[in-house]
Amino acid sequence: MRLGPLPRSIPIKITFTCTTALKTELERYAAMHAQVYGEPVDAATLIPHMLEAFMARDRGFKRIGAPKETE
């Protein structure tokens, strides 16, 4: 699996809306992740890690770079 084991982190809450089909796929992915890594996990726990991995691999996003600090 691409995602790998989940790191420990301090969560903050965010809410989003998705399609029923995407929710089903996220739940299926969570079940497969639990099988591979032997630890139960739900889709809501996986979503931030999936987004972080996606953004880390996005060349266009990386090319733009980090926002500049203002004084």
Image (cartoon, rainbow, N blue to C red):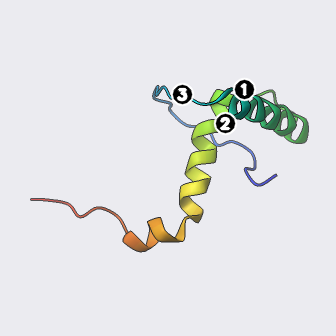
CA–CA distance in space, label 3 to label 1: 16 Å
Which kind of residue does numbered mark 3 sit on?
Thr
Q: Which residue is mark 1?
A: 42
Q: Where does the image place residue 36, in percent across and percent down from the top left?
A: 89, 42
The quadrant holding residue 17 is: top right
Residue 57 point in image, percent of width and height: 59, 64
- Label 2 crowding class (10 Å Cα cut-off): few <14, some 14-19, many 20+? some
In the structure shown, which secondary structural element does the residue marked by tag 1 occupy?
loop
On residue 27, which mark appears? none
Spot occupied by residue 28 in the image (x, y as percentages of width and height) = 82, 33
Residue occupying the point 77% across, 35% down: 25
Foreground disc of the pair 2, 3: 3
Comparing labels 3 and 1, the label whose residue is closer to the camera: 3
* Picture layout, residue 33 above or below residue 66: above
User: Type of residue at label 1?
Assistant: Asp
Residue position marked by numbered label 2 in the rendering: 46
Tag 3 residue: 17
Tell me the quarter of the image containing the C terminus: bottom left
Q: Residue at x 74, y 45 (%)?
A: 5
Evaluate if marks 2 and 1 touch, with contact meaning CB atoms under 8 Å apart: yes
Disc 2 is placed on an element classified as helix
Give, as a three-letter code, the residue at label 2.
Leu
